[in-house]
Every structure is written in C-alpha cells, then in structure tokens.
Image: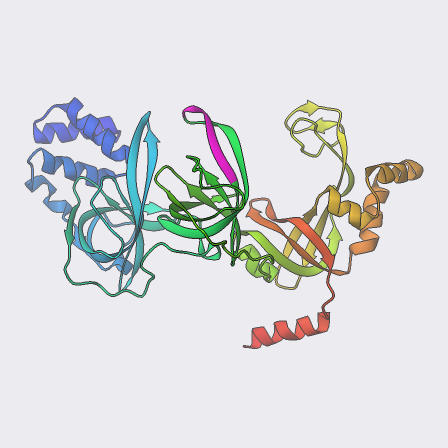
Amino acid sequence: MSLEDEAEALASDLGVDKQEVLEDLEKLTSYSVPLEEAKGSLRRKYGDGSASSGNEPTTKDIGEVDTDDGNVTVTARVLTVGKRSIRYQGDDQTIYEGELADGSGRISYTAWEDFGLSVGDTVTVGNAGVREWDGHPELNLGQSTTLVFEDETLDVEYEVGGDRTLDALEPGDRGRNVVVRVQECEQKTIDGRDGDTEILSGVLGDETGKLPFTDWDPHPEIEEGASVRIENVSIREFRGVPSVNVSEFSSVIALQEDVAVSESAPEMPIGEAVSSGGAYDVTLVGNVIEVRDGSGLIERCPECGRVVQNGQCRSHGAVEGEDDLRVKAILDDGTGTVTAILGHDLTKEVYGGGIEAAKEHARDAMDKEVVADEIREKIVGREYRVRGQLSVDEYGANLDATSFEESDEDPGERAKAALAEVDA
C-alpha cells in the first residue's frame, strides 16, 4: 500500500483531513520513523487511543531487541551523545545519536528531537521504534517516545563516554572524542549540497596510528602540526577504512602540548587485516608469490589516471596514454593474500631504473613485458615487509604501498611463532 493510501485509510478511521495526515506521515517517515510507529503516533495525536492498543510497546532488555520488533521500552545507560545535521527535501534537520546500554548489551539510537540526553544518564525510553541499520537493530526516538530520567545509576560493562584512540574507531561510531595531532591538512573546494563548499581534509595521528579526516565546517584550530582535542565526531567508511568526520557541531580545542604520534604502523597477519575490512596505515609481511598482469611499464589516461589498454580508457575512450611504472604483487603469509600495489617511485627502486630505462629496455626487446618479467625475477619467492593503506571491497584486498622492503626475519622462526599461536 502506498503512503497516500495509508494516509487515506488512517484519515478515514480518525475522521480528519487526509492531506494533513499525509503531510504528517511523510514527515515522520522521512526521518526514518517506521511506518507502524508513525501511524500509532498520529492515532495518539488525533485522539484515537483505542485504535493503537494493538501497537503497545514491549518492555525488553537491549540484548533482546530485534529488527522485527515494532515499538519497545528499554531502561539503559547513555554511553554517547552525538549531534549532526541531515537534509531531506531541501530542509535541514538536526538529529542526536549515539549508544545506549544495559546489562544485556548495547544498541545505537537516533533521536529526531532534543530529549536532553547527556552521557552517563540512566533513562527509561518508552515507545521507541526499532529499525534495521547496517544489519543491526537501532532505536528511533521520535514524537511518540517518552523519556524518564532515573535516579538510580545503571551499572554497565561498557565504556561510558566517547573518548577513543584512533585504532579503536569503527565506521558507524557517533559522538566520539579524539585527541590527535594533525599530520596533513589541505583546504579543498568541493561540489557540496549547497554548491561550492570549502572543506578541510588530511590525516590525523595519535600514539595508536593514523586516520584520514574531513572537516565539513573548517575549524581554524585544525591546521598541519596542531595538537587538538576534537569532540563529537562521527566515523564513516571511506575506501575501506574508517574516516573521521568533523562537523559544525564538533568542538575543537587547541592543546598546548604535542600529542605523540606513532611513527610505525601496526603489523598484522594478512588474514586478520583483510577480515577487519581495511586499515589506513598497516604493515603486512609475506612472500611475493606472483606479479600480476598490468605490472611493469604501463600507460595511464591523462584525464583520470586510469590504466589505458590498447589506447582505450574506460572513462574517456581513445586517448594518448602517458607512461608510468607499477607493480601489482600478490603477497601471501599463509593466513591470507593481498595485492600489494607499488607506484612509480617504489617500482623504480625494485626495477632499478626509471621510465626512460624501462622504455629503452622494451624497445630493445621489442616487448613491453620484459620490464614486468625482470621485476618478477627479482621479487617472486622472496619475503617482503610492506606498509601502506589496505582497502577491501568487491574487487578484493589491495594494499597501496608506501614502503616495500625485503624482510630480514627468519622465515623458520616466523613459522614456529605462527604454529605456537595456532596451538594456543
């Protein structure tokens, strides 16, 4: 049944104007309020309490809340509170979001109005809608939701508050606070929802690692080299890794002391790294078992930088390609595989010469593949320590390398350590 049909049936039951009901339904559903909850809310709004008796909320522990639930009532501790703006049909809407927890589990929530929630509060949330978000249930707090602040504090096993180190951030996190040093910062103009929009983007670092960030409402305190505390950030996934989103509702506090930043990248088994879904800065160690086609001396589109094959770019058609060097090496450590992609500079080091040397080599042999073949001879079968950005998507796991060094570790000792870990 369409929303208009739902509005007509509801208006008929309630004896009120259909257009008014339709507008209310459109507004509520646009804010992701489940349809049945929206209809129940309107029944209460227009005075038909008896008609909603079949939709009474069920009191549940958080761990029992399921995506099939309609409306629920929970008593929980507020772990985090975030605030951001969304836009629907040209209108800006401020929403509040974060996590709630009790003794049985935790759950994310979105509040479509300001209920006055603060971190650490113990609250009974009545008649909250349940929707599915990223495969998990999420509570929607809307017009029909009631909130009671409890005097007795509920003890939970989860961390109360949004302070996190960079390595603990995950896509979907909201209301997080970070203490970081700005490693890189660049001002850009993008085509935003209001036309040309100025943003900041770059890299943040702390003692646990580094992550990319975007500041959608440039804060003057965020500049390269600055140490800052940023409160109320959200985390989204960008190219397979977590990315820190700073908004107009974020607070940025300049710090007097420099934040320590790790100069090394965490080392992980390849299988574990791939299963994690991606990492901005990671070190993987394994044997190069293959150099894939498309390595060596290649050509790129002058417009978009994509690899050109037979004079054709997938986006721009026939183009005159520009010469470049690249390696796509399969790295295997026994727990998994990843494609390590080496750009021009690292490939030049591996090959032992630049583009002109590669072109001369190819001309002499009358075959461009000789460059890739020579690279295969040098690296296949050897163990390498590779650092870079790992992304995992429908095309597989790719590590954009920033360093590529032959490992000096004893493979036998590594194997013993791996076996001991398995036995444990």
Q: Tell me if residue 35 is in the magenta stretch.
A: no
Structure colour scheme = rainbow
Q: Residue 361: x, y in percent? A: 89, 40
Q: Nearer the viewer, residue 152 or 138?
A: 152
Q: Residue 246: x, y in percent? A: 42, 41
Q: Quadrant of the N terminus?
A: top left
- Specify whether 413 is left or right of 16: right
Magenta residues, start to end: 194-201
Name the residue at 74% across, 66% down: 408
Note whether residue 108 is visible.
yes
Q: Quadrant of the C terminus?
A: bottom right
For this orientation, the residue located farthest to the right is 364
Q: Main secondary structure of the magenta part?
A: strand
The image quarter in which residue 371 lies: top right
Note whether residue 293 is visible.
no
Name the residue at 58% across, 52% down: 281
Q: Residue 300: x, y in percent? A: 72, 32
- Specify whether 357 is left or right of 223: right
- Specify whether 272 is left or right of 54: right
The image quarter in which residue 382 lies: bottom right
The image quarter in which residue 114 lies: top left
Name the residue at 14% across, 35% down: 42
All told, the count of numbered labels is 0
Query: Compared to 8, does 118 lie above or below?
Result: below
Q: Residue 262: x, y in percent? A: 56, 58
For this orientation, the residue located farthest to the front is 256
Name the residue at 85% across, 49% down: 374
